[in-house]
Image (cartoon, rainbow, N blue to C red):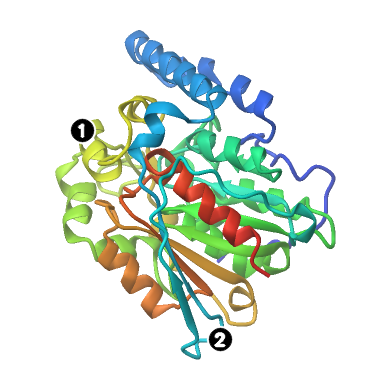
């Protein structure tokens, strides 16, 4: 499946053919696609709440996330494991408050300044607004992409039938890079399946692969297999929610899943500030099911050549710390980092702790 493409250089690596995602700050704020929300049937009340949430996001960007937000975050603990699997382990605990600024990094020493941010199921490029700002302030060049049928990409999620199709904006971005150009790719949750897919098909374009509370699957595994290890979460997703969509008829497999707003608050945002929950609640979209039900083929010769890093979220109710620990134990990455007090969406709940880790990974040679 999905072998019918190669990563070829192109002209504009900032945008995929769908135009989803954003790079510069000005484009990021103005390109929120509010008109498309009404087209998707959003009520006037929800649209007003969405506008208010975006206004809050803009204000938080200008304030650089200081003040009350800094008091919500209490730091991170990182643990790095040697790449060779030879037992060489170094650990150091970091219990710094999130308000402590990251020391300046030497940009000239970086392998790449470009960081591509890939959202998880139901989310969009919008969820990275805090991370985008802080990485830019550090001198890096972050780009957040909308996967197919996500964010402001108007593709009907019920029509997405393969992981390759779902990953197309990321594939397009990597294909447009120069011959010798590489990027760091950070993927959240089920976005990890898209990252694994492009690691297999475009390994030469990826400097480092960062899995953030993500589905880091093994060869022959389905992304959804990771969540079936969380029986409670799987039951909520596919049984209790009663929000399965059947675009091909009830006698055929479901095509998408629409989240219940109250359930995602408990599963995804148990440590997230209220303002960010408001933004997410009116912004999440249904999840195409076919891509996460697809078995992924991974080889040591391609996927295995890319350095992997995993960021664990220790207060995660969607993908528990135990399951995340099992993922890294069964497929050891080059480095493991842990965010204390982070829920499933640390780009909201522990944004500065996440930023520190991403900057540290960017400086690893």
Tag of residue 324: none
Q: Position of residue 287 (x, y in %)?
A: 39, 43
Q: Nearer the viewer, residue 180 or 134?
A: 134
Look at mark 2 in the image and give the residue it sits on.
Answer: 84
Left-right relation of 272 to 124 = left
Q: Residues within 10 Å of mark 2 (few under 14, many from 20)?
A: few
Asked whether the viewer can see residue 285, the reply is no
Which comes sooner in the sequence, label 1 or label 2?
2
Q: Pick the quarter of the image with the N terminus.
A: bottom right
Residue under pointer 1: 262
Question: Front-most of 152 and 213?
Answer: 213
Q: Which residue is depicted at the point 62% across and 64% down?
A: 208
Q: Say which residue appears at 57% left-offset and 79% top-offset.
A: 299
Residue 162, relative to residue 303: is it above or below? Answer: above
Q: CA distance from mark 1 to mark 2?
A: 44 Å
* Helix, strand or loop status at disc 2: loop
- Asked if residue 235 lies left or right of residue 129, the reply is left
């Amino acid at each position: 499946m999905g072998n019918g493409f190669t990563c070829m250089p192109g002209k504009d690596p900032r945008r995929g053919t769908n135009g989803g995602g954003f790079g510069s700050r000005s484009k990021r704020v103005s390109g929120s696609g509010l008109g498309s929300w009404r087209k998707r049937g959003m009520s006037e009340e929800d649209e007003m709440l969405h506008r208010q949430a975006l206004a809050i996001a803009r204000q938080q960007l200008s304030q650089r996330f200081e003040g009350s937000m800094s008091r919500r975050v209490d730091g991170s603990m990182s643990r790095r494991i040697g790449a060779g699997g030879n037992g060489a382990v170094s650990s150091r605990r970091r219990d710094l408050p999130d308000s402590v600024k990251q020391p300046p990094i030497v940009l000239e020493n970086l392998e790449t300044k470009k960081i591509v941010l890939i959202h998880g199921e139901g989310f969009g490029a919008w969820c990275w607004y805090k991370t985008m700002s802080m990485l830019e302030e550090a001198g890096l060049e972050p780009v957040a992409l909308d996967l197919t049928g996500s964010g402001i990409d108007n593709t009907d999620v019920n029509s997405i039938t393969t992981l390759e199709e779902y990953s197309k904006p990321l594939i397009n971005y990597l294909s447009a890079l120069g011959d010798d150009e590489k990027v760091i790719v950070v993927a959240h949750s089920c976005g990890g399946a898209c990252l694994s897919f492009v690691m297999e098909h475009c390994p030469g374009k990826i400097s480092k692969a960062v899995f953030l509370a993500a589905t880091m699957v093994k060869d022959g595994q389905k992304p959804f297999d990771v969540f079936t290890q969380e029986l409670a979460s799987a039951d909520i997703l596919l049984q209790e929610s009663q929000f399965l969509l059947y675009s091909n008829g009830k006698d055929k497999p479901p095509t998408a899943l629409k989240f219940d707003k109250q359930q995602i608050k408990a599963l995804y945002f148990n440590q997230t500030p209220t303002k960010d929950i408001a933004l997410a609640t009116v912004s999440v979209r249904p999840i195409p099911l076919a891509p996460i039900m697809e078995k992924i083929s991974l080889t040591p010769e391609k996927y295995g050549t890319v350095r992997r890093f995993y960021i664990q979220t220790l207060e995660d109710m969607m993908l528990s710390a135990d399951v995340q620990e099992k993922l890294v134990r069964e497929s050891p990455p080059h480095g493991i980092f842990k965010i204390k007090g982070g829920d499933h969406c640390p780009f909201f709940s522990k944004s500065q702790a996440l930023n520190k880790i991403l900057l540290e990974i960017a400086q690893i040679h």
